[in-house]
Image (cartoon, helix red, strand yellow):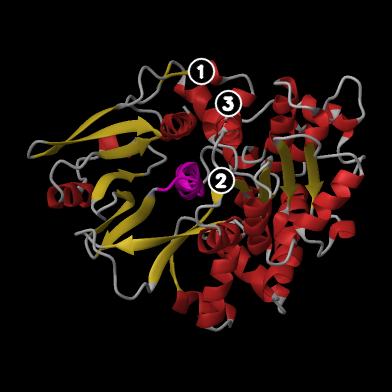
């Protein structure tokens, strides 16, 4: 425990030099505000997929607490995937921490990394929050949806969820020191860029390698993204995390399904199709989809009709990877002119939204489809976007699906993404749609989310 908490004994007190050398993610300030909130007896549950920087975020939070004058021995951090801590309840761990010289003073701060490895963690954490009001507790884990479900079910009034996603395109450029490529005048305006071709080059690179902070800065990892993502992220989730959390027996069956979903990211599929192609029963596929979504590898998006009504039987749906660079690592990198760029550009746009509480769907009916439809709290369309990795929206004359959808929903803002062109598209009958390059649209989404 003393080794895991070097700030107890270092002079001056500080976190490990490795973490000090890393730039904080844009989400850090929001997270720090949650941690600093006084008078609220709640644990913060930090969720997110593997390798997006949850542990680094915790270390940066510890660094800021020390910088603000919190006594170093009032802060303790443990990683619960350490076998030494297996099956030990939080109260026992706290007792050992105090024996080792930690958690001295009030308020004290306890950081529990990879909490999903503690059986019945939500019950233990809720009881701990009630029993130890002088200790502010932060828990983190990689099984995001499973953590959130248990948090909602068992931690009502005691847990505050914070979801850390893969890098957004905005963050990727900022971390590369390229944030000044795009200018955003106001909260409601889209970005502007003087060199859209150069921005597109970075966008294609982001799609290939940009979802993970470590990969974005390591040339060694970039040269072998397949090994990094497959062995360090996907295999650990499919072969270790999910089997241990859910008791999955046929790991190869799960792996085969995930590969099929990754190949078909952003394309409509059905349970019947998946079952026929894989030989796996539909009830098993449903469970596997829930598990993969719980691990934050995929996001299932459901279909609505032209009137924005859901289908009673969700036979058809789309599955998106939460990070387009997973597909590129599994099946090879893509270039700007690749036939796969359309699906990956759509996946990239969806990935900017995944960690927000926006209800996203796609609309499809016999005469057409709209790629993304956002619904408001009353389940009415709030906006819609058709994603293109071409400038055809401004050059072709027919836009019947988008036009038809907008006619059904008067006053609804609609947009097309393009490859390079910006402008307004006249759809007739007083209807207009914005056209904005996909890369610029992605950057603007990420900027607004953390701005």
Category of crowding for the residue at label 3, using alpha-carbon neighbours closer than 10 angstroms: few (below 14), some (14–19), many (at least 20) = many
Tell me which corner region of the image, top left, top right, bottom left or bottom right, holds residue 74. top right
Q: Spatial distance from mark 3 to mark 1, Cα to Cα?
A: 9 Å
Label 1, secondary structure: give it. helix
Quadrant of image for the N terminus: top right
In the rendered image, residue 257, in percent from the top left (x then y), is placed at 60, 70
Secondary structure category for the residue under label 2: strand
Query: Compared with residue 247, is residue 77 higher up or lower down, i.e. above or below?
Result: above
The boundaries of the magenta stretch are 339-357
Q: Residues within 10 Å of mark 1 (few under 14, many from 20)?
A: some
Measuring 62% from the left and 64% from the top, which residue is drawn there? Answer: 259
Residue position marked by numbered label 1 in the rendering: 181
Q: Nearer the viewer, residue 108 or 421?
A: 108
Query: Is residue 293 visible from the viewing direction of this image?
Result: no
Look at the image and say whether residue 348 sits in the magenta stretch. Answer: yes
Q: Quadrant of residue 432?
A: top left
Q: Is the magenta region chiefly helix, strand or loop? A: helix
Query: Is 407 in front, or is 451?
Result: 451
Q: Which mark is residue 274?
A: none
Q: Within the magenta stretch, is there residue 376?
A: no
Mark 3 vs mark 2, foreground winner is 2
Q: Earlier in the sequence, mark 2 or mark 1?
A: 2
Residue 6 higher or lower than 323, as above or below:
above
Please tell me whether residue 247 is drawn above or below residue 80 in the rendered image: below
Residue of label 3: 173
**Residue 306 screen position, x and y as percent:** 21, 59
């Amino acid at each position: 425990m003393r080794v895991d908490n070097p700030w107890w004994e270092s002079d001056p007190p500080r976190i490990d030099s490795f973490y000090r050398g890393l730039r904080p993610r844009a989400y850090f300030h929001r997270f720090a505000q949650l941690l600093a909130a006084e008078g609220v007896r709640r644990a913060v549950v930090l969720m997110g997929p593997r390798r997006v920087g949850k542990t680094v975020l915790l270390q940066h939070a510890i660094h800021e607490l020390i910088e603000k004058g919190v006594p170093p021995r009032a802060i303790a951090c443990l990683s619960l995937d350490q076998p030494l801590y297996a099956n030990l309840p939080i109260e026992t761990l706290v007792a050992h921490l105090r024996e080792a010289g930690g958690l001295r003073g009030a308020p004290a701060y306890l950081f529990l990394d990879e909490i999903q490895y503690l059986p019945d963690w939500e019950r233990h954490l809720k009881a701990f929050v009630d029993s130890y009001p002088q200790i502010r507790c932060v828990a983190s884990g990689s099984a995001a949806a499973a953590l959130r479900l248990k948090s909602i079910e068992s931690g009502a009034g005691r847990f505050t969820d914070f979801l850390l996603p893969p890098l957004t395109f905005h963050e990727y450029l900022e971390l590369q020191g390229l944030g000044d490529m795009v200018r955003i005048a106001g909260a409601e305006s889209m970005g502007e860029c003087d060199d859209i071709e150069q921005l597109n080059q970075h966008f294609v690179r982001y799609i290939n390698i940009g979802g993970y902070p470590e990969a974005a800065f390591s040339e060694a990892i970039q040269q072998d993204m397949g090994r990094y993502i497959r062995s360090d992220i996907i295999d650990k989730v499919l072969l270790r995390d999910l089997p241990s959390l859910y008791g999955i027996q046929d790991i190869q069956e799960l792996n085969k399904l995930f590969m099929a979903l990754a190949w078909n990211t952003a394309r409509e599929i059905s349970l019947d199709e998946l079952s026929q192609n894989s030989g796996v029963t539909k009830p098993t596929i449903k469970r596997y989809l829930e598990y993969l979504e719980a691990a934050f590898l995929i996001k299932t998006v459901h279909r609505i009709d032209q009137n924005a009504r859901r289908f009673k039987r969700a036979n058809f749906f789309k599955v998106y990877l939460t990070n387009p660079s997973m597909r590129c690592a599994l099946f090879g990198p893509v270039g700007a002119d690749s036939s796969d760029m359309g699906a990956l550009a759509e996946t990239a746009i969806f990935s900017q939204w995944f960690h927000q509480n926006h209800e996203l769907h796609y609309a499809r009916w016999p005469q057409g489809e709209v790629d993304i439809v956002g619904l408001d709290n009353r389940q009415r369309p709030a906006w819609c976007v058709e994603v293109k990795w071409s400038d055809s929206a401004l050059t072709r004359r027919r836009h019947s699906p988008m036009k038809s959808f907008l006619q059904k929903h008067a006053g609804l803002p609609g947009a097309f993404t393009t490859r390079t062109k910006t402008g307004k598209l006249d759809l007739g009958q007083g209807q207009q749609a914005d056209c904005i390059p996909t890369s610029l649209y992605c950057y603007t989404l990420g900027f607004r989310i953390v701005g």
